[in-house]
Image (cartoon, rainbow, N blue to C red):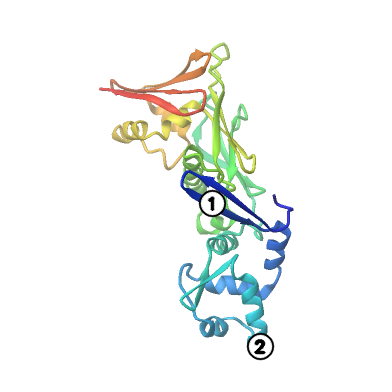
Amino acid sequence: MGNNDSASESTEKGRGSLDIEIQSSAAVFETLGNETRIEILEVLGDPPGEKMSFAELYEAVAMDDSGNFNYHLNKLLGTFVRKEDGQYLLSHAGEQVFGSVQAGTYQARATVEPTAAGGTCQLCEGELIFEYTQELVRVYCDECGEGRSFPFPPGCLPDYDIAELPAVSARWYRTHVKRVLDRFCPLCAGEMTGQLIHGVNEDSDPPEPSLARFTCTTCGKQVHLTGATIATFHPVFEGFLFEHGFDTRGGPHSEVWAALDSTTEATHTRDPLSVEVTFTHDGETVTGFVGADASLTNVERQY
């Protein structure tokens, strides 16, 4: 799709219909390859959602030739800029480009050297380390090397002290996971399908947790999550944790799991594959089953 010329597709679903016009990626990026057009997007994006007349927009952009300015504005219309009631504002695509520029996605390069993340590894109790490189956060154990990595916008880094970044990135990771569990691709917003690819390996020491793979049907991006992570984001599990004084927003989930009286995963059935996840604290238990499609069902809280 990315290299094709403009195309039109119509798909009927039920009583409605869907019309899609697809432009080539080359044509779209060529549209952005001009400083005046980028400046127009930046002016319209400050703040996003506000409308401007032609005169207001022309006055705000550093250009003396109104005809030339109008040429560049028309190049953006329909893709990155839309017109309502004679005024201009960013389209959704324009807001996405503006947001990416503000986040430093395309132009910023940043590195944070390895620093203590303020937690311990659930597998071996080693110290957790935080680092940032190539636009990825890595949180890993300095003993066994296990951990996770996820994208984090470099434009966020200057807003926080280095000591705050592990907690800040944990909050960001939370939004990343919730989007996946809602079955939206964090990269392209396409639909994600889930599959529980293996249960718990109880013969390993410590037991190896289950693993689910989420795959985008549009771009193919894959995200892997454990059964315990999937359970942690379920409203009943979240309520259980919150009522017992645990906050999953400010640090690694493994810290919360380790603080509970008991956190267990066990393979429930093998055909079809399913995993039972159980959290226990202060005599209360919450249980759920991660099925073959990586969805959590049969959630039950026992007081």
The CA span between labels 2 and 1 is 40 Å
Q: Position of residue 43 (x, y in %)?
A: 55, 74
Can you say whether 185 is above or below 292 in the image?
below
Residue type highlighted by circle 1: Leu
Q: Position of residue 246 (x, y in %)?
A: 35, 35
N-terminal label among 2 and 1? 1
Quarter where residue 144 is shown: top right
Q: From this viewpoint, which residue is outermost toward the left?
A: 303
The residue labelled by disc 2 is: 65
Along the viewing direction, whichever of 182 and 4 lies nearer the viewer:
4
Looking at the image, which residue is at 53% across and 61% down?
A: 92
Depicted 253 relative to depicted 57: above or below = above
Residue appearing at x 51%, y 58% in the figure: 159
Q: Quadrant of the C terminus?
A: top left
* Label 2 packing within 10 angstroms: few (<14), some (14-19), many (20+): few
* Label 1 neighbour load within 10 Å: few <14, some 14-19, many 20+: few
Please name the amino acid that badge 2 sits on: Asp
Q: Is residue 300 left or right of residue 159?
A: left
- Residue position for label 1: 18
Establish if 198 lies above or below 128: above
Q: Which mark is residue 134?
A: none
> In the structure shown, which secondary structural element does the residue marked by tag 2 occupy?
loop
Q: Position of residue 295 (x, y in %)?
A: 46, 29
The vertical placement of 59 against 27, above or below, is below
User: At numbered mark 1, what does the secondary structure look like: helix, strand or loop?
Assistant: strand
Q: Nearer the viewer, residue 246 or 81?
A: 81
Query: Which one is in front in this view, the residue at disc 2 or the one at disc 1?
Result: 1
The image quadrant that residue 25 belongs to is bottom right
Q: Residue at x 40, y 25 (%)?
A: 297
Nearer-the-camera pick, 105 or 165? 105
